[in-house]
Image (cartoon, rainbow, N blue to C red):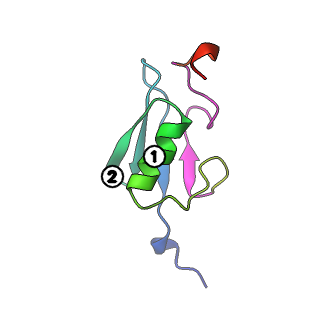
């Protein structure tokens, strides 16, 4: 049986006015992301690189999913 305490709960918060999104694990700020690649890198630096960013149940996306980055235009992608 899995112990839920061993699994991190990552939150990608709703976009700020500049479009960036805070990434937290519990009360700890892991970083600030401006696009999905930033989330991947933040998780890699936190030794959580085995987490599937777009599909994992360990990540809670608030204020929009992994495709929602209001600060980006089509030219930035």
Camera-side residue of 44 and 3: 44
Q: Residues within 10 Å of mark 2 (few under 14, many from 20)?
A: few
Question: Can see residue 12?
Answer: no
Q: Is residue 62 magenta?
A: yes
Point out residue 4 in the picture as x, y percentages from the top left corner. Answer: 52, 73
Q: What residue is drawn where x is 50% and y is 58%?
A: 49
Label 1 belongs to which residue?
41
N-terminal-most mark, 1 or 2 = 2
Q: What residue is drawn where x is 51% and y is 18%?
A: 71
Q: Mark 1–mark 2 contact, CB under 8 Å? A: no
> Which contiguous range is marked in magenta?
57-71
Q: Which mark is residue 3?
A: none
Q: What residue is drawn where x is 52% and y is 31%?
A: 35
Label 2 belongs to which residue?
27
* Extreme residue toward the bottom, this view: 1
Report, in whole angstroms, how far the alpha carbon at label 1 lies from the one at label 2. 19 Å
Point out residue 62 in the picture as x, y percentages from the top left corner. Answer: 54, 38
């Amino acid at each position: 049986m899995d112990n839920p305490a061993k699994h991190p709960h990552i939150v990608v918060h709703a976009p700020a006015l500049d479009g960036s999104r805070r990434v937290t694990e519990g009360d700890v700020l892991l970083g600030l992301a401006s696009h999905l690649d930033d989330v991947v890198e933040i998780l890699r630096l936190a030794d959580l690189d085995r987490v599937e960013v777009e599909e994992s149940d360990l990540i809670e996306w608030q204020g929009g999913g992994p495709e929602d980055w209001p600060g980006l235009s089509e030219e930035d992608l």
